[in-house]
Structures are given as structure tokens and as C-alpha cells.
Amino acid sequence: MEAVLYICHGSRLESAISQAIEFVESCKNLRNEPIQQYCFLELSQPTISQALEECVALGATQILAIPVLLLTAAHAKIDIPFELEKAMQNYPQINLQLGKPIGINNEIIDLLFERIKQTYQPITLKTKILLVGRGSSDLDVKRDLSLIAKRLEEKINHPVHICFLTGCKPYFRELIEEFNDLEIDRIVIVPYLLFTGLLINGIRNIVEEYSQKNNNKYILCDYLGNSSVVVHALNNRIDEISFNKVMS
């Protein structure tokens, strides 16, 4: 019997956990597998090990594990495979296939454009647009976000600057500080994040801090959230694992 295991990041905020679960429930509606379970890499439960145990208890013999992540970094490359390998030692009879994070996806780039349009703010020559990623020491993250920014630039015909909240430069706070000294009319901030959480709250806090320091207009777009675009993008990644399993 086949199962899908959705591996979310996890958060200390209940609202972020609720959004992740709601997102997974939307994904489940597109699947036919009889067993579908969610879990969290850290900070929340069920853990990967607990969810795998539940899948096996429900009769799973094949498990499609999918990271509920936007970009490929250490979590996808190291942490999730490590946790899965450790847990799977208890189930040598089970066939497990691990999929990829969503990655660079043209439909999600369209969604970013839509998030900008939803602010109803004009984009002028004096407007700065910031695409804000979580950040990582993994160089692939910076490369991928740069490619996404480039495609978004082409779509809106306006420069898009990338920055990060942690892990690599340029940092969001530093870029906001740098823009302080420029003659601009507004800064449009586009979070490249799935759900609410401490990172979104951090962006809001920095925006509030700098709003009190100067006359710049800060426009914070909505994060990606439980959009059907993101749901379908993740579903396509699950299809890839299933197809590869059949072909192998």
C-alpha cells in the first residue's frame, strides 16, 4: 500500500503550524494514495520518525516522502535524508522514495507577480523591489533565488533585488539600511516564504522600525501561503517520485 509523507519545516508559532497543516490538507485532496501523513523536521510534532511509524502501522509498504520546502538547501540535502535514514532502519521491508523541494517554478514566479499586484501600488522608477528569502549557507539557495528574481524582473520589467533573513548576504536589514539614503518613493517587500512564522514577524518588526526613522513607504506583500499554485507545484513533485518509482 502506498503512502505520502509530507515533511514540513516546523515552527514555534501555532499559527505557522496550522497553516502548514492546512496546506497539506489541500495537497491531500489532489492525491489518491490511501495513506497520507504530515510531519515536521523540527520544533513540532509529529516528528518524521513518528509519522513513518504511523504510515507503517496503517499498512504502508511504499512511502513517497516530499519536503514541503521552497528551495533546496541543507534541510533537503542533509537533515531530512538523515532523519529518514535513521527512522527507516526500523523498517527494512519498506520502500521509501524521497522527492525534491519545489525549486524554481514559473507558476510560483507568476504568483509573486500577483502578490505585488495585490498591493495596488504603482511601480515607478524610484521604487525598489526586494525579494526576501529565508537564507542559507548553501550556495544553491542564493543561486536559485537570484534566478527567480531575474525571471520576476523580466515579468514586471523592473529591477528586483534579493536579500536574506539569515545565513547569507545581502541581509534584509542591511539592504533596508542602504536604501535609507537613496531617493526612492517606496520599497516593495516580497517574502519568498511559504507560511507565517518568526521570519515574517522579523520582517514586520524591521519594517516598523525603519518606518519610524524615515519617510520611505514600505509595502509588505503577502507570503505565498496556501495558494493553489503552490499546492499544485508540490503535487507535481510527488508525481515525479511516483513516476520514477514506476520506471525504476
Image (cartoon, helix red, strand yellow):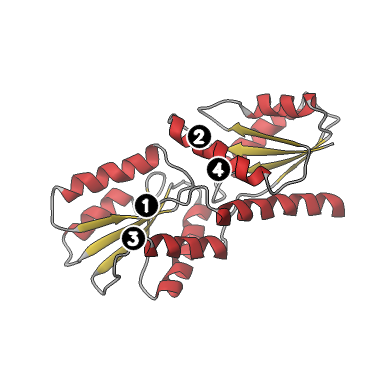
Are discs 1 and 2 less than 8 Å apart at CB?
no
Q: Which residue is mark 1?
A: 169
Instruction: Measure how far apart labels 3 and 4 are at the Cα level.
Output: 33 Å
Instruction: Measure how far apart labels 4 and 1 are at the Cα level.
Output: 17 Å
Between label 3 and label 1, give the one nearer the viewer.
3
Earlier residue among tags 4 and 2? 2
Q: Quadrant of residue 15?
A: top left
Q: Which mark is residue 22?
A: none
Dot 2: within a 10 Å radius of its alpha carbon, few (fewer than 14), some, or many (20 or more) residues?
some
Instruction: Measure how far apart labels 3 and 1 are at the Cα level.
Output: 27 Å
Earlier residue among tags 1 and 2? 2
Q: Which residue is mark 3?
A: 119
In the rendered image, is residue 248 in sight?
no
Earlier residue among tags 4 and 1? 4
Q: Which residue is mark 4?
A: 74
| Type of amino acid under label 2 | Ser
What x and y, as percent, mark residue 63?
77, 38
| Type of amino acid under label 3 | Thr
- Give the residue at x 56% y 63%: 107
Where disc 1 sits, the SS reads loop
| Type of amino acid under label 1 | Lys
Q: Is residue 25 left or right of residue 61?
A: left
Q: Which residue is mark 2?
A: 18
- Give the residue at x 67% y 43%: 28
- Give the residue at x 35% y 70%: 159
